[in-house]
Amino acid sequence: MPAALTAPKVTFIPAKKDQIPINVLSSEAVKRLRVAAYARVSTNNKEQLTSYEAQVDYYTRYIQSKPDEWIFVEVYTDEGISATNTKKRDGFNRMIADALAGKIDLIITKSISRFARNTVDTLTTVRKLKEKGIDIFFEKENIHTLDAKGELLITIMSSLAQEESRSISENVTWGQRKRFADGKVSLPYKRFLGYTKGPDGLPEIVPEEAVVVRLIYRLFLYGKSPSAIAAYLTDEGIRTPSGKPVWRASVVESILTNEKYKGDALLQKKFTVDFLSKKQKVNEGEVPQYYVTNSHPAIIEPEIHDLVQYELKRRKADGRWTSCAHPFSGKIFCGECGGVYGSKVWHSNTPYRCVVWQCNEKHRGQHCTTPHFTEREMQAAFLAAFNQALEERDEIIAAYQDVMDALTDTADLDAERGQLQNEMEVTLELIRKTIDDNARHALDQQEYQQRYNDLCQRYEKAQARLGEVENQRLERTAKRVKIKLFMEQLNARDTLVETFDEELWYSTVDFVTVLENKELIFTFRDGRKVQISNTKWRAA
């Protein structure tokens, strides 16, 4: 028979005072606490800055007023930073790092909403500090985190603060969309070249910056790629929109494609996906957009802007950006194989060194019979071709308006565009009605799906045709601008041109086709073709 169990004996071991976590709530604690405070305002306006300075002064005085109990560490601060998450709050993050490193025993802050408006961030930080015996005191709510009831109250209060942040975010979003619907334009002026905020709150042109914008557009129309323009601006010491010395091709392309430079504004290109992370996404139809015409003064003429959009699409479709380090780059084509002419250095290490232009395909196995040209020869040929057009100027001017009307009239496309837009609106409404009917009534699902698919196809067909019409309109508009540029150069000269001028070349020549026997066909921007024989340009 097993021996009877004896009753367990419990021996009480009293706590040692120097091993008790330092807790401001403990009446037994005699050690002076190292105390810090945290102050934050979320905007940089004057009223908030006054509040910010008052918080710093208040906590400094408050902590130092108890020298027998507390040792003042620091008032950690964040100025003009939102509290939705803690990732970008340098003062806050430094304070937590110091606390975890054993430099702080107690943190005082005004309220949970000043500490963080994100429940997860608040609780994670509180628990992390609590494990180290570090207390946080929220004055407004009168909560100590080392109190047994503290975590429950913090959870409730920080959830309320998070909902407050959501409400504020939704109100701000609503206000922004209301401004968009009213056509009110606001730009990120610190990173936007060419405009500043005017006294009426609308964009106002900055003349010296507008010169740079116009230069970018002109260089692009001359044939330079965004990367070549970026290199040129960097070499010239011109600063980027954000004030940096080095330009990127992406920045140049964003300026070339931004409709605001022609005085219009597409609003809500991006939207905030989540109010906590503040993550933004390009608007691909998830939320409405608004296009405002003539919303502010234009730096670039609308027709020039449209021509640039056409050129961007054309060059990308060709799969070739022209760097245009030289005026002839990307402008001369082989009449036999269609290849582009490029520059080559002959006899580079001899006294007979020279630069010639020849078909690039000859180095890729093509045996083209088209000839090469020196730079001087091509310049002479251009002068001969342009002067021939100049001699026919009166005839060209007389036919100018008829040619413009015939080649660039968009009345038929405008009418079709209106019809297609109406068709899309009607079809979209029918799709919505079909979906609503299916939700409200017990319909045959096979018939419903067929009807829905038919309407979707109808909408997509109209949408695809609208894209084609827009492209055709853009082509005709681009052609009008090209003719206009050519005519301006033609009208500006009363006498024959004797010396090669790069700007004249860029603004009048579309491309050059090389034939056998050094014959050339110059296609000018108005579509006019001038064929120059070897003997004629050599004589010129």
Image (tube, grey):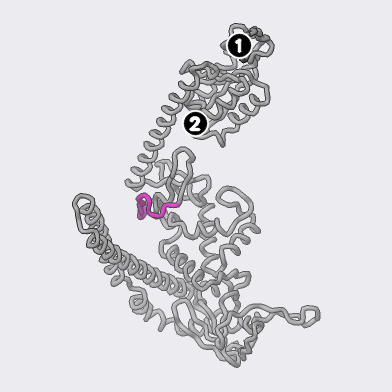
Judging by the rendered image, the residue that carries numbered circle 2 is 42
The furthest residue to the front: 1
**Kind of residue sitting beneath label 1:** Ala
**Quadrant for the N terminus in the image:** top right
Element type at mark 2: loop
x, y (%) of residue 522?
52, 83
Judging by the rendered image, the residue that carries numbered circle 1 is 4
Residue at 55% over, 70% down: 223
Element type at mark 1: loop
The correct choice, above or below, for 519 with respect to 186 in the image is: below
**Quadrant for the C terminus in the image:** bottom right
Residue at 60% over, 70% down: 324
The disc placed on residue 433 is: none
x, y (%) of residue 362?
64, 85
The correct choice, above or below, for 458 with respect to 518 in the image is: above
- Magenta residues, dominant SS class: loop
What range of the chain is rendered magenta? 282-294
Q: Earlier in the sequence, mark 1 or mark 2?
A: 1
238 left or right of 288 in image: right
Quarter of the figure with residue 399: bottom left
Residue at 62% over, 6% down: 28
- Between the residue at mark 1 and the residue at mark 2, the CA separation in whole angstroms equals 71 Å
Residue 488 in sight: yes
